[in-house]
Image (tube, rainbow, N blue to C red):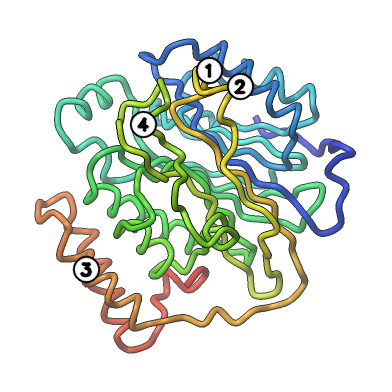
């Protein structure tokens, strides 16, 4: 249920600023101590409140309700994306805002569980990957378009197909609003998927823009006792894009929600929190058509040639032709 307008914390009363938090809570059926970790998460949120939260892997209704009970006490409007679709699938995306959710939609990716035994089990359990797109009026900012997603954990071609669809879904939105895109993308900053979002999609990475590097940091870390990997990787992001009349500036961006110590993590992921300042001013995007075309060409070469990616290949081919002509594809016009 979409809830109405709520009051906000006094600590957030700063002119023209707002805070965005993304966090994968790690709530699948096989995860340990989910309820306990969610209670600890609620305590952390209370200590350091933010205007908006986008959660991934909030798989079960009971998990959502547990977090909802804590956050509504602190005047958050909450939404679980699985309640606004009728497909009986689970994508595990939740959102909470100091303000009002004006419009909400959610969808599944067309290319989803296509990669072996693990995906077969996910499909049997009704677990899929998807997105939510919410138009939100925060108490402390103009209207914003919040997009939250969780892409495939292992397969690059599937992630590419999902991100292509996601960019098109963002491009369908009718209102010209600043865009905040958050999620667990399962792709590192040196990946083709990242270039698809930033070079082709024109989205800006708030953490990198502020800190200029991902050296010696991770959001999915090998030392985390809940991690399934021995490698340190950055795979969680807060991306953004200005509207034609409102520009966003990054004031601070940090990796957070790491737990009390290295032995007591809140999740197998760490969070990203970004503080934005908005200004009533349009900005030139400085589109690089040649770079976008080059990225599309590289992606097309890496994309699996099996039939489920045929529609993705057609989209990439059309985008490539348009960028080569130094034209913005119509379905990317809102963001590129």
| x then y, percent, for residue 62 | 54, 14
- Dot in front, 3 or 4: 4
Residues at discs 1 and 2 in contact (Cβ within 8 Å) = yes
Q: Earlier in the sequence, mark 2 or mark 3?
A: 2
**Mark 1: few/some/many CA within 10 Å (<14, 14-19, 20+):** some
Q: CA distance from mark 3 to mark 4?
A: 29 Å
User: Which residue is disc 4 drawn over?
Assistant: 222
Q: Earlier in the sequence, mark 1 or mark 4?
A: 4
Q: Earlier in the sequence, mark 3 or mark 4?
A: 4
Residues at discs 3 and 1 in contact (Cβ within 8 Å) = no
Q: Earlier in the sequence, mark 3 or mark 1?
A: 1
Q: Is residue 239 left or right of residue 68?
A: left
**Mark 2: few/some/many CA within 10 Å (<14, 14-19, 20+):** few
The residue under the point 66% across, 60% down is 250
Q: Quick one: SS at disc 2?
A: loop
In front here: 238 or 70? 238
User: Which residue is disc 1 drawn over?
Assistant: 264
Q: In the picture shown, does residue 97 fall above or below 124?
A: below
User: Which residue is disc 3 drawn over?
Assistant: 298
Q: Quick one: SS at disc 4?
A: loop
Q: In the picture shown, does residue 37 fall above or below 176?
A: above
Q: In the picture shown, does residue 193 fall above or below 284?
A: above
Q: CA distance from mark 3 to mark 1?
A: 41 Å
Q: CA distance from mark 2 to mark 4?
A: 17 Å
The residue under the point 66% across, 32% down is 78
Q: CA distance from mark 1 to mark 4?
A: 14 Å
Q: Earlier in the sequence, mark 2 or mark 4?
A: 4
| x then y, percent, for residue 220 | 41, 36
User: Which residue is disc 2 drawn over?
Assistant: 260
In front here: 22 or 163? 22
């Amino acid at each position: 249920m979409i809830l109405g307008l709520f009051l906000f914390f006094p600590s957030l009363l700063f002119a023209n600023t707002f805070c965005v938090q993304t966090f994968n809570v790690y709530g699948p059926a096989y995860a340990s101590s989910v309820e306990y970790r969610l209670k600890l998460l609620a305590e952390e949120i209370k200590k350091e409140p933010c205007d908006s939260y986008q959660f991934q892997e909030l798989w079960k209704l009971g998990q959502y309700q547990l977090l909802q009970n804590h956050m509504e006490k602190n005047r958050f409007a909450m939404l679980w994306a699985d309640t606004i679709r009728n497909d009986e699938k689970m994508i595990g995306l939740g959102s909470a805002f100091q303000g009002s959710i004006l419009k909400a939609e959610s969808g599944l990716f067309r290319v989803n569980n296509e990669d072996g035994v693990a995906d077969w089990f996910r499909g049997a359990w009704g677990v899929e990957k998807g997105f939510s797109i919410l138009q939100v009026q925060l108490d402390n900012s103009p209207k914003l378009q919040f997009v939250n997603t969780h892409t495939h954990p292992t397969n690059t071609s599937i992630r590419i197909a999902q991100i292509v669809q996601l960019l098109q879904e963002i491009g369908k939105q009718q209102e010209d609003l600043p865009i905040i895109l958050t999620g667990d993308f399962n792709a590192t900053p040196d990946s083709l998927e990242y270039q698809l979002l930033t070079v082709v999609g024109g989205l800006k990475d708030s953490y990198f823009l502020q800190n200029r590097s991902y050296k010696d940091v991770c959001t999915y870390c090998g030392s985390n006792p809940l991690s399934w990997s021995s490698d340190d990787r950055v795979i969680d992001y807060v991306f953004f894009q200005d509207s034609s009349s409102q520009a966003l500036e990054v004031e601070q961006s940090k990796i957070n929600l790491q737990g009390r110590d290295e032995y007591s993590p809140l999740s197998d992921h760490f969070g990203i929190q970004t503080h934005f300042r908005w200004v009533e001013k349009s900005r030139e995007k400085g589109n690089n058509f040649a770079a976008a075309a080059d990225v599309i060409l590289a992606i097309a070469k890496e994309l699996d040639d099996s039939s489920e990616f045929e529609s993705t290949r057609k989209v990439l081919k059309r985008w490539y032709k348009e960028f080569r002509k130094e034209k913005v594809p119509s379905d990317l016009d809102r963001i590129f």
